[in-house]
Image (cartoon, rainbow, N blue to C red):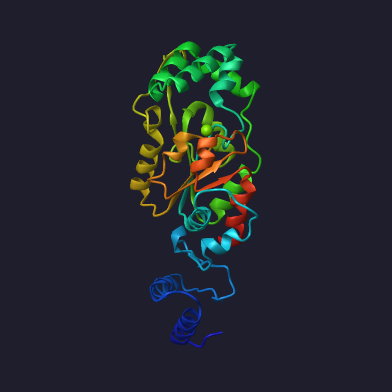
Amino acid sequence: MFRSASSFAIRSSRLLKSSLLTQKQCSSAFRLSTTVGTLKTLSPSLHLTTLSAPYHATSRVAMVSGEEMVKDFSSPVGVDVAFAMQTLAESDCVCFDVDSTVINEEGIDVLADYLGKGAEVAALTKEAMEGGMKFQDALAARLELLKPSKGSIESCLRDTPLQLTAGVEELIKQLKASGKHVYLVSGGFRIMIEPVAKVLQIDPIKNVFANTILFDDKGEYLDFDANEPTSQDMGKPKALQIIQQSNGYKKMVMVGDGATDAQAKPPAMAFIGFGGVAVREKVKATADWFVTDFSDLNKIIKTYCH
Ligand SMILES: [Mg+2]
């Protein structure tokens, strides 16, 4: 034990200097130590130094480069895998797409099937994609076709609850345990995503960006809220910009299966493509890192962020 606060400070300072930290990192870590009155012994052999404090996730000091992290994987796919891995390890905010990413299906297809209009909606979706229809027009057309009442959506969710993708629950748990903030950013419907957020213990108000269906006072379909950023083209970068500006995040990562998720970089620093449900070749070819199993992301978090 240390005899006094000053000998503790000297010892702490030596430990910091003997580690691989830069002077700037030492100084910020030391300021933190004096604030919380505790400082974990730093060792160059550690992969990552975690300071115990109510402190922003970016205070975690990665002592391993992305190039080193890559060595833990056999033939990872992506245009800049080392960068993506290091950014994920150092990130303070991770945003997930929902359809075919957090859940292993497309919410609107589940609803359309339930309402007996699956084939019609699928044809409309295909037409919209091939014809380059604006996102908001495609959304409006599909909702006009479905005209879902609040009651019909609730019974759809009750009878056929949306299914989480394997490994996502554990990944989100680990991300949160390492101090990272987690958001769901979706072109799908808030009313369908909120139960998913609840299971994942994600705040459905603050940490979910999705489209809002408007109902009349009898619960019949009225319209959708065109003010939601996710209801428009380039909605995901807009949503991430709002998230970043409201919270001052330094390093954001977007995870998703689709081209609209890839658009979220920037403001996301890295884009991780997810092909565990559906592989989109364009996404696979452009993602910083492309994974088909969430355990790959979890490996980075568990190895370098705790
Ligand atoms: Mg998706």
Image quadrant containing the C terminus:
bottom right
Res 141 quadrant in image: top left
Task: State the image coordinates of residue 95 (x, y, percent, origin top left).
Answer: 48, 43
Task: State the image coordinates of residue 159 (x, y, percent, origin top left).
Answer: 65, 21
Residue 135 to residue 284: above or below: above
The reply to whether residue 306 is visible in this rendering is no
User: Which residue sits at x=40%, y=76%?
Assistant: 23
Tally of marks:
0
Depth order, front residue of 277/212: 277
Res 294 quadrant in image: top right
The reply to whether residue 73 is visible in this rendering is yes
Residue 5 to residue 48: above or below: below
Residue 11 to residue 103: above or below: below
Image quadrant containing the N terminus:
bottom right
User: Which residue sits at x=54%, y=51%?
Assistant: 176
Residue 290 horizontal side relative to residue 137, left or right: right
Task: State the image coordinates of residue 42 (x, y, percent, origin top left).
Answer: 54, 75
Residue 32 to residue 180: above or below: below
Residue 75 horizontal side relative to residue 197, left or right: right
Depth order, front residue of 297/201: 297
User: Which residue sits at x=54%, y=40%?
Assistant: 284
Task: State the image coordinates of residue 38 (x, y, percent, origin top left).
Answer: 50, 73
User: Which residue sits at x=45%, y=73%?
Assistant: 33
Res 242 quadrant in image: top left
